[in-house]
């Protein structure tokens, strides 16, 4: 698979997943909260703030995936990877392995795709 196409796919999946979780925080906050924390108005407000950031990020990233602006895509891909990296640390803070492993995995794959696309290589090697 060509590296730029791989980066576009990974970036699109990354921002869609992030948007899904922020929307889930509005619809059903208990689904993303630790078991010992119940939903309240403050949590709903923070979920709204998260969604207000992830929806525009996703919209612009998807537009860049469809378009031909490589440098802008690289910047957004880096930003999306860093966001997932920080989300992984939030999972660690919550003592929830599933909320750490997923974001860290997405971040690693995002950074690998970014590396190969920026390197200018045409192929992502598979073994």
Image (cartoon, rainbow, N blue to C red):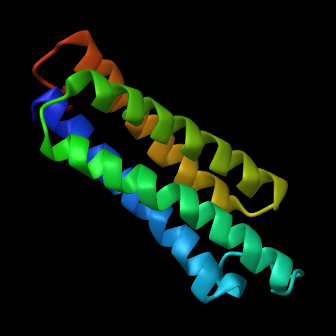
Count of numbered circles in the view: 0
Residue 3 horizontal/vertical position (percent): 17, 28
| Vertical order, 14 against 127 (above or below) | below
Farthest top residue in view:
119
Image side of residue 21 versus residue 43, left or right: left
| Vertical order, 12 against 33 (above or below) | above
Image side of residue 113 versus residue 67, left or right: right
Image side of residue 11 versus residue 100, left or right: left
Residue at the image position 60 percent from the left and 40 percent from the top: 85
Residue 93 horizontal/vertical position (percent): 83, 54
Residue 54 horizontal/vertical position (percent): 50, 57
Q: Does residue 73 show up?
A: yes
Quadrant assignment for the C terminus: top left
Residue closer to the observer: 114 or 1: 114
| Vertical order, 96 against 5 (above or below) | below
Within the image, what quadrant is residue 118 found in? top left
Residue at the image position 73 percent from the left and 46 percent from the top: 89
Residue 58 horizontal/vertical position (percent): 38, 54
Residue at the image position 87 percent from the left and 80 percent from the top: 37
Residue at the image position 63 percent from the left and 77 percent from the top: 25
Residue closer to the observer: 79 or 100: 79
Q: Does residue 33 show up?
A: no
Quadrant assignment for the N terminus: top left
């Amino acid at each position: 698979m060509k590296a730029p196409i791989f980066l576009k796919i990974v970036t699109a999946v990354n921002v869609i997943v992030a948007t899904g979780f922020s929307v889930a925080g509005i619809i059903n906050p208990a689904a993303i909260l630790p078991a010992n924390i119940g939903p309240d108005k403050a949590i709903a407000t923070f979920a709204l703030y998260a969604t207000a950031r992830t929806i525009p990020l996703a919209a612009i990233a998807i537009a860049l995936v469809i378009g031909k602006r490589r440098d802008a895509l690289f910047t957004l891909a880096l930003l999306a990877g860093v966001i997932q990296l920080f989300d992984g640390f939030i999972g660690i803070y919550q003592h929830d392995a599933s909320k750490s492993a997923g974001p860290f995995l997405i971040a690693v794959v995002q950074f690998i795709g970014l590396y190969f696309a920026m390197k200018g290589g045409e192929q992502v090697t598979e073994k």
